[in-house]
Image (cartoon, helix red, strand yellow):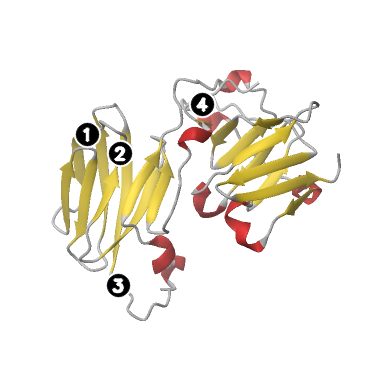
Amino acid sequence: MFNGSAYAINRVDNPITVDSRIKTFVYSNNEIYNVVFNYGYHSYIEFSKGETIKMLAMGNNVGWKVKPVDNKLFIMPLEKNGKTNMLIETNKGRSYAFDLICRSTNESGDDNDEAGYSELRDLAYIVRFYYPKTEEDFKLEQANLPDISILSTVQDPKKHVVIKPNNTSDHYVINTKSENKKTSPVELFDDGKLTYFKFSNNNQIIPQVYIYNHLNKKIPCKMLLLQDYVIIEGVHKNLYLEYKSESVKITNKKL
């Protein structure tokens, strides 16, 4: 059974994205967040309610204008095509690491081919964080995860697990309408005990996953976010993914 953790997803607080320029990242103190800003435009990074900055360090503080206000950090790049890093410590004991990138507005509207950059997809006006529930501690040692490698030199328990994609993705048929693509996984497989999903744009939108039990009752699956995978317990004949008005049915044709 999943026992929850800083990586267990509670549907109530799942991120909701309305505009591609509003970014939502899943918080982890082991991640470096890449954020693309527009030259001459103000944007802001929003932390959790009541969370304020105790320490802020930037590699280049001349080319960027930053101003903390309550739980927000307002940022405006002052140099075209600038790039730097930013480290933040907050009053809630959280650490954040960012790579800040500035792009000048592409007036033609065409994408910049450099490093696959897309103005519409990558520009950020607002950056928010989704904070998985910490009170439901997920214990890796009790998860019975298969195919794991324990590295004695690594202190971070998340790094003890090696997730190995396999060809069971061929077992699944995704029934979706073209307009429901945001809800469909871009990667899906199982290892006989757990089912693994990845969603588009680095799991920017995570739908709720449901199954139906033997009484034909709709049951939400407890989900775990680990190493960019959304994981649920078990391998199921039918899975139902829902986000807002969108829904997707996934069938395992081998069961």
Quadrant where the C terminus is found in the figure: top right
Q: CA distance from mark 4 to mark 1?
A: 28 Å
Q: Give the residue type that dot 1 points to.
A: Thr
Q: Sequence order check: which comes first, mark 4 or mark 3?
A: 3
Q: CA distance from mark 4 to mark 2?
A: 25 Å
Of badges 4 and 2, nearer the viewer stands: 2
Residue placed under numbered mark 2 in the picture: 47
Q: Sequence order check: which comes first, mark 1 or mark 3?
A: 1
Where does residue 77 sit, x and y in percent of width and height? 21, 60
Of badges 4 and 3, nearer the viewer stands: 3
Give whichever of 230, 248 is nearer the camera: 248
What label does residue 52 carry, if any?
Answer: 1
Identify the residue at horizontal 41%, vertical 47% (top origin).
24
> Which SS class for mark 3?
loop
Q: Are marks 1 and 2 in contact (CB under 8 Å)?
A: yes
Quadrant where the N terminus is found in the figure: top right
Q: Sequence order check: which comes first, mark 4 or mark 2?
A: 2
Residue placed under numbered mark 3 in the picture: 105
User: In which image quadrant can residue 176 be found?
Assistant: bottom right
Q: CA distance from mark 1 to mark 3?
A: 31 Å
Give whichever of 162, 6 is nearer the camera: 6
Where does residue 80 sit, x and y in percent of width and height? 23, 68
